[in-house]
Amino acid sequence: MVKSAERVLDILEFLRQSGPSTFSQISAALDLPKSSASMLLHSLVSKGYLALDPRAHLYRPTYRVALLGEGISSRAVLDNHALSDALNELHKNTGMTIVVGLRNGAYVQYVHVLSSSQNLLRRLPVGKQRPLSYNPLGKVLLAQCGDDEARLVIRHNNAARNESLPIVPEAQLFQQVTAIRDRGYALDAGFSWPNAMIAALAIHPIADLPPLSVAAGGLKEDFEQRGDQIVDELVRTMAPWRK
């Protein structure tokens, strides 16, 4: 991706998560050179995508950002009130952090996060990418693929993985994907933190678009005490969008 375009998207994602922010907060959080940050913010303001409060020196998105998706608003996934309400209901009823994932090549990307201040998954950043076969949100998406494609992705993930990530044999990862097909959901420990756990499944909000993954995650001790309840609530709440 062209660097300036990537930085524009990073700014919009940051403001989406953090709310109105100052120049210093934006440039520091995104590690942007001040000259680049100044130029990009000035352009976004002049084009009407951001508004600058001259007294508080805060940048915030305008309605023009929201209207970028106007052409697909009737089919928008996360703006679909029924699904959005269901995600909020799942968040409220479980007390877990809720994450929505979208496949991006051989990776799963977090596109929506409802954080819980009471557990370790409260800081999952929107836009973050993880290898499909090493992440429960990715594994449930791999389970939607054919065997050949799933094996190809697993090999790619193993070849391109960060060295800090312990390698898992292809056969073992493929067996996990196969088990998810049979069970209908993933339940993984060690999700980003050693004492965390996450339950995930795939949903199909729009028939002719790729599936999404939805996960409820929190502390292992919570799953030890009420894991069945969390999984049941996830399955029940997402039932209208499952095949």
Image: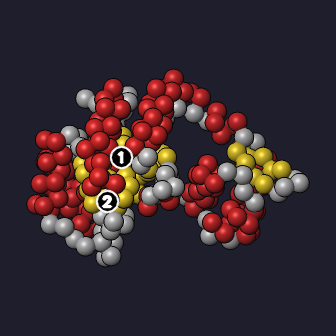
Q: Is residue 85 above or below residue 40?
A: above
Colouring method of the image: secondary structure
User: Which numbered circle lies on residue 40?
Assistant: none
Whole-percent x, y for residue 165 in the image: 30, 72
Residue 38 location in percent, x, y?
76, 62
Residue 230: percent from left, percent from top: 32, 44
96 w.r.t. 237: above or below: below
Query: What SS does tag 2 mark?
Result: helix
Q: From this viewpoint, is residue 28 visible?
A: yes
Which residue is more in the foreground, 94 or 161? 94
Q: Which residue is rendered at x = 61% and y = 65% of the image?
A: 30
Q: Quadrant of residue 55?
A: bottom right
User: Residue at the spot x=78%, y=46% of the render?
Assistant: 51
The residue closer to the viewer here, 69 or 86, is 86
Q: Residues within 10 Å of mark 2 (few under 14, many from 20)?
A: some
Viewer-closest of 151 and 186: 186
Q: Secondary structure at mark 1?
A: strand
Residue 80 seen anywhere in this rendered image of the structure: no
Q: Residue at x 28, y 38 (%)?
A: 232
Q: Is residue 237 left or right of residue 37?
A: left
Q: Disc 2 designates what residue?
A: 220
Left or right side of 64 for 1: left
Q: Amino acid type of disc 1?
A: Ala
Q: Which residue is mark 1?
A: 215
Of labels 2 and 1, earlier in sequence is: 1
Q: Quadrant of the C terminus?
A: top left
Q: Quadrant of residue 37?
A: bottom right
